[in-house]
Amino acid sequence: MKPSLFSCGSAVLALAAGTWMTDSSGAQTRPEAGPASAPRLADDELASDRRRLLDLAFTAATAMPAHPHLKTRSLLQEEVVRACIELGQLRTARAYADQIANWRKGAACAELAQPLVERGLVDEARQCLAIAQAAADDLDRKLQNELGYDDGEIESPQDWQRDQIRVRMAQALVVHGEDQKAAALEAGVVESEAGRVDAVRARQASVEDFEVLMTALEAELAGMSFDRARNALEACVELYERFYADAERRARAERALRDPAAKLPQDVRFELLRRAAGAALRHGDADKARELLREADAIVKQVCASGAWIPEHEIPLRASLARLRHDVGDAEGARAELAEAAARYEAERANIIEIYRAGALRPLAEAALALGDEPAARAFYLRALEEGAVNANARPRAEDLVATCLSLARHVVAPDPELWQRILAIRADLKAPW
């Protein structure tokens, strides 16, 4: 039987007895280290240039002054932590999370707890969850007492902040097999967070779990809440892949994904179809992937024909479609789609507000890389760096530099000397005015 991560207490959840010890002064101390053979917190092997990009992204975010930019700085720092988690840099993720100054430190630690549990690093997960719980409880105290702004603070507590932390904690608990305690954390959360834990449940669902979970998700889709429907469909995608070999269950999950009753934005629907196509490809079902591609293509055509979308939203959607075409084996169609997306950027550049231009270029770079055109990818990245460095204020420049460094690190692009030179020059120039 697994030792519990948490036991119930006066707060929503409290650390299990014995996890922490108290000295004679009443202060908490860490428990003694376990056996030498126990797994230790470490970073996975990663190319040095990718590590350097992560570090540059974090230092760029941290260079932003806390006042009056604490919210933006902390959000960017959390994005770097998330990238570290994705790339298996768990020790670095923990070190970065510890430097976040606001409630997002708790959110980042809560998110880190799940991969720690998955790797058997339960003591480290407990420590992260303790930090997360303290942050959630602090927000809850302020909300209950209507404290609002504290002296010197620049953001007021929000219930969604507390609930985001609690839901991420619940996800770690589900992975650890403590579903009842996870459910206690989920109870009563705000709409935007409701149902997010179900995606984790779906990833490890048994045949017996499928009916219960799928029935609950279908009920959410029949409701009127956009947030609940979106979160339910995230879980449906996970069920679709987990039960792909089971034709009946797979078909039921797919029907939910295509259910027009869930009135979701077209970009959200596109992303769900793209992920479902990826699942089909991983299971060797190219015909199904092409079928899903056709439906995704129809969404993009509808979006583009409507003229309702601004270019910086349309161009990333076209770039993502190019990647999907490539994935299903339509190399020529993928190249044509990417060329059309790039042409769209050139035609509309003047109509895109300067702080959004790099955000349209990065997806083009990522698509070019997926298509195997690394020179084009580097050119798009260099262009993104240039466009992101135009604004006179350092804050938007820092936001774009962080995003571009993380994109490079995630998509395995080793910057050439020209790219490095530009990255370092932009980093060095992050100074007042912010």
Image: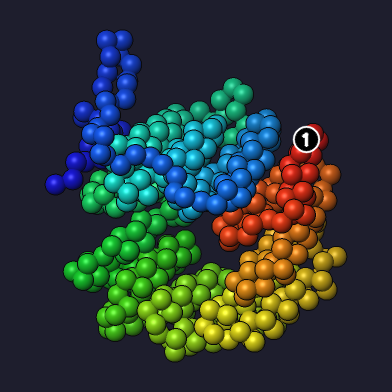
Picture mark count: 1
- Name the residue at 36% across, 56% down: 197
Which amino acid, by three-letter code, is at mark 1?
Lys
Which residue does the numbered mark 1 point to in the structure image? 431
The one nearer the camera, 216 or 167, is: 167
Q: Secondary structure at mark 1?
A: loop
Q: Position of residue 184 (x, y in %)?
A: 28, 46
- Name the residue at 49% across, 87% down: 290
Q: Position of residue 222 (x, y in %)?
A: 38, 72
Instruction: Specify whether 123 is left or right of 88.
Output: left
- Name the residue at 63% across, 60% down: 413
The one nearer the camera, 233 or 174, is: 174
> Is 417 placed above or below 37 here?
below
The C terminus is located in which quarter? Answer: top right
Instruction: Specify whether 416 is left or right of 128.
Output: right
> Is 259 placed above or below 176 here?
below
> Is 297 placed above or below 420 here?
below
Q: Is residue 360 visible from the viewing direction of this image? A: no
The one nearer the camera, 243 or 184, is: 243
Q: Position of residue 40 (x, y in %)?
A: 34, 39
Q: Position of residue 24 (x, y in %)?
A: 27, 10
Residue at the left extreme of this rendering? 1
- Name the residue at 37% across, 79% down: 283
Q: Is residue 431 visible from the viewing direction of this image? A: yes
Q: Residues within 10 Å of mark 1 (few under 14, many from 20)?
A: some
Residue at the top extreme of this rendering? 25
The one nearer the camera, 226 or 232, is: 232
Q: How is the image coloured?
A: rainbow
